[in-house]
Image (cartoon, grey):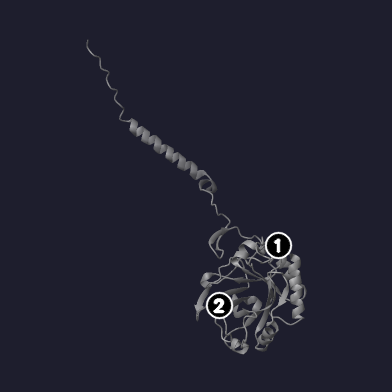
Amino acid sequence: METMTRKKRKRSPLLPLVLVAAATLTVVLVLVFRSLLPAAQREEPDPHAGQIYVNDGANMVWLTPHENFAVSPLHRWQFVTLEEQPWYVGSEFTVRRGVDLSVFQKNVDWAKAAESGVEFAVIRLGFRGYGKGALQPDNLFDSHLDGVHAAGIDAGVYFFSQALTAEEGREEAQYVLERLNGRELELPVYFDWEPISAEDSRTNGYDYANLTDSAVAFCQTIQAAGYQAGVYINRQQGYYHYDLSRLADYSLWVADYNSYPDFYYRFDMWQYSANGQVDGFDIQVDQNLLFVPKNAAE
């Protein structure tokens, strides 16, 4: 019996071309459609839209900025190093060099310090004990303040706080005012709250919920007595622990140990070193730059 064989069907030579043309047309239509969409729908949303990329003192992080606090006008390119010290070369501020100190700096030759370029000093007036919370004086405060003014150097004050509540912040301010007893200051009185991690520290494990309340209560009390008020912070505190929008009326003193200050928000004074070697001091001392707006200095 003869075997029947089925003839193979020949594929049209045009079919591949038709498929390619159809695919190309699809791509073109998709591109045309996307081009007609608004830009926001054509691109993937930016996960960091509206945020800032900052150094928080430990890492580079993305943060959502405060809406009601001014941004720093200082930039990295406005700073140079002169004689191993940072210096501002911008045009918006008059800059002054200064120190801050406490009982740990003894036997200061203030005349020599003034000759070396020290224009101001922020002096510790006292502190709250981190254990029982007692208010205590800095035993060299009066001597330092007398020496500063005798040498023609401007003076400010800081109080080392361990306040847990607004009431304690207010109590610390009253203690400062009693010790000042009306003495003249050219610079603010600063609230300096720093964490103490010792096992018996009253602020160990503090959740920072009342920190801004404490600072505001301190500053309001100081200003009501006719002095300027301010808050000393580091970058971690400024970005995470304080509500800066509530500190807009006070001076900010920022600790940032670097060749230029990179804190995102506005501040008035920059503590750039904790181990400075300054003529007139026989021990290391903190060093600072004070930024005075040109329009305020004139």
**Is 44 situated above or below 9?**
below
Q: Which residue is mark 1?
A: 210
Mark 2 and mark 1 lie on one chain; the one further toward the N terminus is 1
**Is 61 situated above or below 294?**
above
Please name the residue shown 77% across and 78% down the image.
Answer: 178
Q: Residue at the left extreme?
A: 2
Please name the residue shown 74% across and 68% down the image.
Answer: 168
Quadrant of the snapshot with the N terminus:
top left
Q: CA distance from mark 2 to mark 1?
A: 31 Å
| Residue type for callout 2 | Asn
In which quadrant of the rendered view does residue 154 lie? bottom right
Q: Is residue 235 visible?
A: yes
Q: Position of residue 106 (x, y in %)?
A: 62, 84
Q: Position of residue 179 (x, y in %)?
A: 75, 79
Q: Out of 295 and 145, give the one closest to the viewer.
A: 145
Q: Is residue 298 visible?
A: no
Q: Position of residue 79 (x, y in %)?
A: 52, 74
> Are the two marked residues, 2 and 1, in contact with CB atoms closer than 8 angstroms?
no
Q: Position of residue 88 (x, y in %)?
A: 55, 76
The image's mark for residue 275 is 2
Disc 1 is placed on an element classified as loop
In which quadrant of the rendered view does residue 248 lie? bottom right
